[in-house]
């Protein structure tokens, strides 16, 4: 099993690098759209409706992919004061509880997306981007979080203290 985890590390590194590049491209897209819209409104006295709609789509993907990458890097928000004061056994139990809760939430997101997508056959008004594509960022984030959670579970079961 140790060989499996060691073999998975380069794959996770490659995945994180690819996602960080995608996040950089999304940031550039949002900056371009917002800048174009601000320039159009204040200099040309014209509002680009495509820029507002596209920046919203890119921002949704940016936030949810960023959350997934944050999970892969174990950079989620946590209050560590009480955890650091707790004995090792309680820390491990609380870490297992947190991992279980994250699994339940991610599975709910994946099951909920399946139900949600059945009702969204429409598209965005200006660009015609399907809402299915827009909201598909949710299961991508859930899958990335499940991967990160599984790595954390293996690490915890191998005796690494949280």
Image (cartoon, rainbow, N blue to C red):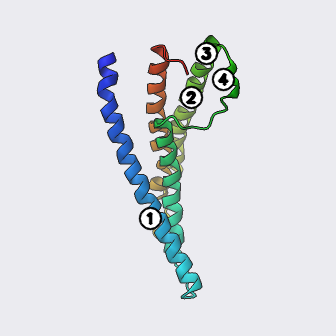
Indicate which disc residue 29 carries: 1
Q: Earlier in the sequence, mark 3 or mark 4?
A: 4
Q: How crowded is mark 4: few (under 14 residues within 10 Å), some or many (20 or more)?
A: some
| C-alpha separation, residue under disc 1 versus residue under disc 2 | 33 Å
Return the residue nearer the eye: 130 or 85.
Answer: 85
Q: Residues within 10 Å of mark 2 (few under 14, many from 20)?
A: few
Indicate which disc residue 136 carries: none
Residue that badge 3 annotates: 93
Q: Do the residues labelled 1 and 4 touch (CB within 8 Å)?
A: no
Residue that badge 4 annotates: 83
Q: Which residue is drawn at 48% across and 25% down?
A: 152
- Quarter of the picture containing the C terminus is top right
| C-alpha separation, residue under disc 4 versus residue under disc 2 | 22 Å
Q: Residues within 10 Å of mark 1 (few under 14, many from 20)?
A: some
Looking at the image, residue 159 lies above or below residue 120? above
The percent coordinates of residue 113 (x first, y second) are 52, 43
In this picture, residue 80 sits left or right of residue 39: right
């Amino acid at each position: 099993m140790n060989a499996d985890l060691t073999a998975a590390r380069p794959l996770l590194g490659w995945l994180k690098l690819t996602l960080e590049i995608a996040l950089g491209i999304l940031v550039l897209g949002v900056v371009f759209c917002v800048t174009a819209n601000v320039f159009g409104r204040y200099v040309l006295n014209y509002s680009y409706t495509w820029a507002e709609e596209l920046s919203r789509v890119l921002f949704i993907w940016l936030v949810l992919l960023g959350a997934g990458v944050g999970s892969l890097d174990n950079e989620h928000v946590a209050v560590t004061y009480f955890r650091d004061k707790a004995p090792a056994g309680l820390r491990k139990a609380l870490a297992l509880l947190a991992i279980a809760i994250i699994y339940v939430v991610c599975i709910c997101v994946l099951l909920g997306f399946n139900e949600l997508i059945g009702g969204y056959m429409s598209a965005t008004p200006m660009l015609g981007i399907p809402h299915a594509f827009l909201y598909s960022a949710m299961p991508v984030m859930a899958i990335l979080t499940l991967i990160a959670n599984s790595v954390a579970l293996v690490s915890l079961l191998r005796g690494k203290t949280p």
